[in-house]
């Protein structure tokens, strides 16, 4: 029985040894999508919708000042300039970027959040 167990586990050990720590993803990988972009006279900003977590999923909006590229672990090649987790008990009405004040604002209205609505949000300049 022990020999059978070793025979079954041996290939798994070799399979895991091929992956470096840099390539290894966590147990759950976030789902990410660029859902909007907006051009200003100086830059293009990208709005990213991220769903993180296993059973209790967290929805997050991230804003980038360059186009992000995500690897197979959903990690970006650049840092987001703003980020905000979304309130699940409310519906998002507007997402604003205020360039003069260097701020990012998510406005809500009453109503249950909808992932379909959140995936189709538009970034607005305030």
Image: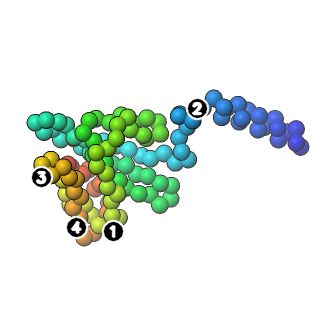
- Coordinates of residue 125 in the picture (x, y in percent): 13, 49
Along the viewing direction, whichever of 36 and 42 lies nearer the viewer: 42
Real-space Cα separation, disc 1 to disc 2, in angstroms: 40 Å
- Disc 4 and disc 2: Cα gap in Å? 46 Å
What residue is disc 3 on? 126
Horizontal and vertical percent for residue 73? 47, 39
Q: Residue furthest bottom?
A: 110
Can residue 125 be spotted in the picture?
no
Tag in front: 1 or 2: 2
- Separation (CA) of disc 1 from disc 4: 10 Å
Q: Identify the residue at horizontal 42%, vertical 46% (top origin).
A: 31
Residue at the farthest front position: 101
Query: Who comes first in sequence, dot 3 or dot 4?
Result: 4
Label 2 crowd (10 A; few <14 / some 14-19 / many >=20): few
**Mark in front: 3 vs 4:** 3
The residue carrying mark 4 is 109
- Is residue 31 at least partly visible in the picture? yes
In x, y percent, where is residue 79?
A: 34, 41
Left/right placement of residue 4 relative to residue 84 reads: right
Residue at numbered disc 1:
89
Decide which of tag 1 and tag 2 comes sooner along the chain: 2
- Dot 3, how many residues are within 10 Å of its Cα: few (below 14), some (14-19), or many (20+)? few
Residue holding disc 2 = 20
Q: Secondary structure at mark 2?
A: loop
Dot 1 surroundings within 10 Å: few (below 14), some, or many (20 or more)? few
Q: Quadrant of the N terminus?
A: top right
Of the numbered discs 1 and 4, the one sitting upstream in the chain is 1
């Amino acid at each position: 029985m022990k020999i059978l167990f070793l025979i079954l586990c041996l290939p798994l050990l070799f399979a895991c040894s091929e992956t470096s720590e840099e390539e290894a993803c966590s147990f759950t990988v976030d789902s990410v999508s660029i859902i909007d972009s907006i051009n200003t006279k100086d830059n293009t900003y990208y709005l990213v919708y991220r769903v993180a977590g296993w059973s209790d999923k967290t929805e997050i909006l991230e804003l980038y000042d360059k186009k992000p590229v995500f690897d197979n672990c959903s990690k970006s090649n650049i840092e987001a300039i703003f980020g905000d987790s979304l309130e699940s008990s409310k519906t998002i009405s507007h997402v604003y970027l205020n360039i003069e004040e260097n701020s990012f604002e998510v406005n809500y209205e009453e109503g249950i959040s909808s992932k379909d609505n959140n995936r189709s949000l538009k970034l607005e300049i305030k």
